[in-house]
Image (spheres, helix red, strand yellow):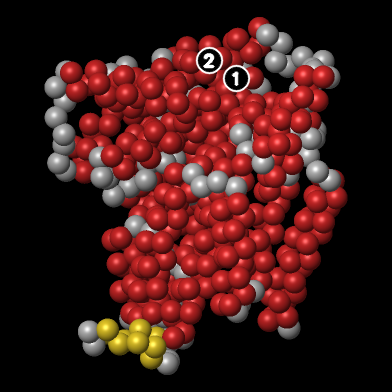
């Protein structure tokens, strides 16, 4: 495995650049496609995870938080328009994930395995905080994952506040999912050819 | 011009929904969704479900919509189960099955939520089933959306099948090498890497090639010929203004309700 410093402190991309270059314009659809495929693979392997933000993580790492946020947003919009209409509203969560990953990566929180652990917790928290109100509004607090909903049902049955029950349901699932995705993204990024990383950074 | 005229005549003979532009369809879906959140009466919700279902049935049903409905019906069933049994407002028993009592309040809450979910699925399903990628692309560009944003949205629909094809090839190659199915979660996650790494590198490589091709073909050139919309749409501006006005009124009502609760 070719080891390299995955976070160049002298990153050549501007963290908050909104202008879309041609390179970013072609990177974003690829990231959306990776999200789709990762989710399909997770379902195929019957993993208790979504993995549907892997492309968003990689886009944020390669081209900054804006690219990641747009990838996440478009992913949910396209997913919503083709497979599950309600998932469109979770585009806000994906934007949050993209921004969080971009900032953390830019500040060196994807440099080594220990730091990735902390990043995964922060990203899971961001995702949970944004998703919980949406879960309560659209699904009465549930997440749609059987064992997470079993926790939710137990807490509701014990007269615990719906917001706290929904937050716990979402956080337990998000924590596991974001750990898996963060480490996968970390390992995959280390395997990317340097010319590829440079291409997306140079074309910002 | 003649060709376009002929195409319009052909389209006019086809389906009524072809004269409704894509933005109107999306605004209609948003309007129905917001209206369902404004209403709290289950009969009104049922009426809205019926309206959106009729809209969907008058167009055409797709497998994707049926999948979305079946997945949501399962979730709605679990919602009825959990809310019917454990909702904090539960007071009046509705039905007892095998000594398990379901309560009116929880079941009503779950049914209202379920109705809203169905309204979203049916109205978005109407949009999905009645528009094509190229129709959306040409229409969005013709109404002034920047072409790079249009490209961004639409290219996803074309790139996905390409990535799926790459995935199949890589999976086939991995199987031929004798990679066995894994049992534990860690093993399963590890088994993803030999598939994901080549797939992602190939996908990014293709996007670099695409980017170079677009740059060479003058993607950033300010002089562009905008393609004419595929269909002749009926009263687009009027329907946009009307639906946007209704959406603003609904959002205003909801905000007023929230503010009133704090006063």
Residue displayed at 42% across by 92% down: B92
Q: Are marks 1 and 2 in contact (CB under 8 Å)?
A: yes
- Which part of the image, by quadrant, shows the C terminus of chain A? top right
To which quarter of the image does residue B185 belong? Answer: top left
Query: With respect to residue A43, does A189 lie above or below?
Result: above
Whether residue B197 sits left or right of residue B163 in the image: it is left
* A46 to the left or right of B4: left
Taking depth in this image into account, of B210 and B39 the one nearest to the observer is B39
Q: Residue furthest bottom?
A: B92
Give the crowd class for mark 2: few <14, some 14-19, many >=20 residues within 10 Å. many
Task: Tell me which chain the residue with mark 1 is part of.
Answer: A
Q: Please state the horizontal and vertical placement of residue B206, each as a whole percent of the image.
A: 48, 15
Q: Quadrant of the N terminus of chain A?
A: top left
Left or right: B74 in relation to A107: left
Q: Chain of mark 2?
A: B
| Residue drawn at the location 84% of the way across and 46% of the way down | B235
Residue to which mark 2 is pinned: B208
Quarter of the view holding residue B3? top right
């Amino acid at each position: 495995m070719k080891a390299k410093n995955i976070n160049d402190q002298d990153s050549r991309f501007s963290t908050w650049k909104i202008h879309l270059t041609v390179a970013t314009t072609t990177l974003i659809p690829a990231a959306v496609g990776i999200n789709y495929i990762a989710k399909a693979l997770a379902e195929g392997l019957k993993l208790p995870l979504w993995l549907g933000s892997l492309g968003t993580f990689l886009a944020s790492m390669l081209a900054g938080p804006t690219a990641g946020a747009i990838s996440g947003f478009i992913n949910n919009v396209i997913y919503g328009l083709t497979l599950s209409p309600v998932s469109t509203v979770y585009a806000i969560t994906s934007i949050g994930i993209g921004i969080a990953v971009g900032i953390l990566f830019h500040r060196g929180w994807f440099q080594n395995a220990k730091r990735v652990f902390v990043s995964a917790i922060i990203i899971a928290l961001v995702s949970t905080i944004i998703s919980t109100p949406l879960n309560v509004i659209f699904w009465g607090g549930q997440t749609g994952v059987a064992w997470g909903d079993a926790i939710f049902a137990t807490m509701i049955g014990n007269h615990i506040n719906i917001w706290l029950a929904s937050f716990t349901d979402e956080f337990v699932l998000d924590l596991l999912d974001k750990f898996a995705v963060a480490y996968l993204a970390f390992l995959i990024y280390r395997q990317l050819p340097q010319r590829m990383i440079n291409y997306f950074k140079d074309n910002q | 011009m003649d060709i376009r005229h002929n195409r319009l005549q052909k389209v006019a003979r086809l389906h009524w929904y072809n004269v409704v532009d894509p933005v109107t369809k999306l605004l209609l879906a948003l309007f129905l969704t917001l209206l369902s959140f404004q209403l709290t009466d289950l009969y009104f919700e049922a009426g809205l479900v019926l309206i959106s279902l009729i809209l969907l049935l008058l167009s055409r049903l797709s497998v994707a919509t049926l999948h979305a409905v079946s997945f949501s019906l399962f979730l709605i069933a679990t919602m009825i189960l959990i809310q019917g049994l454990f909702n904090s407002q539960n007071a009046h028993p509705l039905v007892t099955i095998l000594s398990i009592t379901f309560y009116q309040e929880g079941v009503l809450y779950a049914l209202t939520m379920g109705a809203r979910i169905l309204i979203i699925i049916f109205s978005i399903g109407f949009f999905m089933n009645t528009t094509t990628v190229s129709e959306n692309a040409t229409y969005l560009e013709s109404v002034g959306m920047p072409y790079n944003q249009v490209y961004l949205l639409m290219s996803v629909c074309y790139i996905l099948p390409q990535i799926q094809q790459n995935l199949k090839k890589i999976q086939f190659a991995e199987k031929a090498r004798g990679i066995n199915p894994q049992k534990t979660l860690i093993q399963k996650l590890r088994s993803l890497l030999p598939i994901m790494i080549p797939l992602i590198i190939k996908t990014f490589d293709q996007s670099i090639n695409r980017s170079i091709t677009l740059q060479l073909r003058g993607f950033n050139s300010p002089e562009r010929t905008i393609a004419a919309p595929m269909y002749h749409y009926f009263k687009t501006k009027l329907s946009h203004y009307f639906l946007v006005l209704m959406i603003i009124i609904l959002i205003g009502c909801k905000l007023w309700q929230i503010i009133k609760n704090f006063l």
